[in-house]
Image: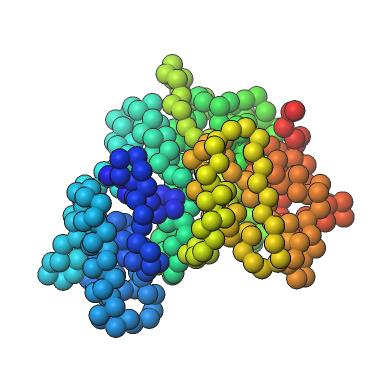
Amino acid sequence: MEFKLLGPLEVVLDDRRAALPTRARERCLLAALLVSAGRTLPPGELIRCAWDDDDPPEGTFRSYLAHVREFLAATDGGARLAREEGGYRLLVDPDSIDLHRFRRLQGQAAAAARAGRADEAVAALCEAEALWRGPALGGLPGLWASAIQDSLDEERLACVKRRLGLELDLGRHAELAGELRRLSARYPLDEVLIACEMTALYRSGRQADALALYRQARDHLLVQGIEPGPELAALHQHILRQDLQPPRVSLRRRPALPDQPSAVPAPAGAFVGRADELRALTSTTPGPAQVAVITGMPGVGKTRLAIEATLHLASRYPDGQLYLEFHTHQAGVAPLGTDEALRRLLEMAGCRTPTPSPRCCPGAGRVPSSSPPGSACPG
């Protein structure tokens, strides 16, 4: 049995998804127990995970928890909810939960890196990243789920940055170019990612581009009222003097890594209804160039249905998933122009595009450009 938290909550038994508890709060209780597997959780903490600041009747909490226990027993996957002094503890093999495998692999990578086995560390980190299927706990409502999503996203980004640093040390700068472009577009103020991209550009013989990236990054930071940190500033000086330390060279091949941009937002709450429509969107046979169109009046839930279908289908499309908001019915915001829409799609896909002016691209002024000047991807 597999319990999947690094994406929409899923329980997989014999390669088939099990039907989850129907109530959103029961799914939150299950997720909380899985996140803290092996640790005793007091009733008050479980209640906060599922009810936020509300205080449900004790009978309701016990009933919902009983349903979770029945679900675990029915799946017969070796997980058991135990009542212990001070609370409840999920007894389960931690390796059957993707989140705990993710953390174990990061620990393995750290140990390998300390021992000087950088290739082995990179392989473990690539395996850890491959466990992600989208925003963690996608579709779960509530303050606890939102906080956990943010925390796990930080863990994922930290894992990515550790791998990037190791791969740059191994001389793989050319292979990282596209991924670094996508990451810098998504996190334009992250100085570690800026430094990684500057290093990759410089080592690829593109000193001018590396310096231009620093200038643009500094401009972004100054808008926030801060100067680049000492490490980024020192890297800038090394590139100016052309004395950046060369990387070590690895003769081993780079491990396979899912290189998939995903701009799909995390769902705002539980998805209710539209079962027939969702089935129609997700039950098609995989194949090239399939197009689905969802129509309806504003506000009926077309976007929410599209996001839910995308989360279900993400594993079929490992090259990535893109999401673009056209603001067609958003009060006070002009609809997105076609030039700006194309620019954003190219940027999400890892292509560097020229910074547009608000005059030529309606809507561009409301979204800061995060890519350094350059040219779009070759055809």
Q: Which of 6 and 228 is in front in this view?
A: 6
255 horizontally vs 228: left or right? left
The quadrant where residue 29 appears: bottom left
Q: In this view, does 80 lie above or below 329?
A: above
Numbered marks: total? 0
Colour pattern: rainbow
Q: Determine the residue located farthest toward the left in the rendered image.
A: 85
**Is any part of residue 150 visible from this angle?**
no
Residue depicted at x 62% and y 64%: 301
Q: Determine the residue located farthest toward the right in the rendered image.
A: 359
Task: Indicate the position of residue 143 as horizontal and vertical percent values.
Answer: 44, 70
Task: Indicate the position of residue 199 as horizontal and vertical percent values.
Answer: 57, 33
192 horizontally vs 323: left or right? left
**Is any part of residue 14 visible from this angle?**
yes
Task: Indicate the position of residue 72 as horizontal and vertical percent values.
Answer: 24, 56
The quadrant where residue 96 appears: top left
Residue depicted at x 42% and y 56%: 137
3 horizontally vs 337: left or right? left
Q: Nearer the viewer, residue 16 or 117?
A: 16
Q: In this view, does 312 lie above or below 29?
A: above
Quadrant location of the C terminus in the rendered image: top right
Q: Is residue 68 above or below residue 278?
A: below
Residue depicted at x 81% and y 53%: 337
Residue depicted at x 70% and y 44%: 345
Task: Indicate the position of residue 360 as horizontal and vertical percent values.
Answer: 87, 51
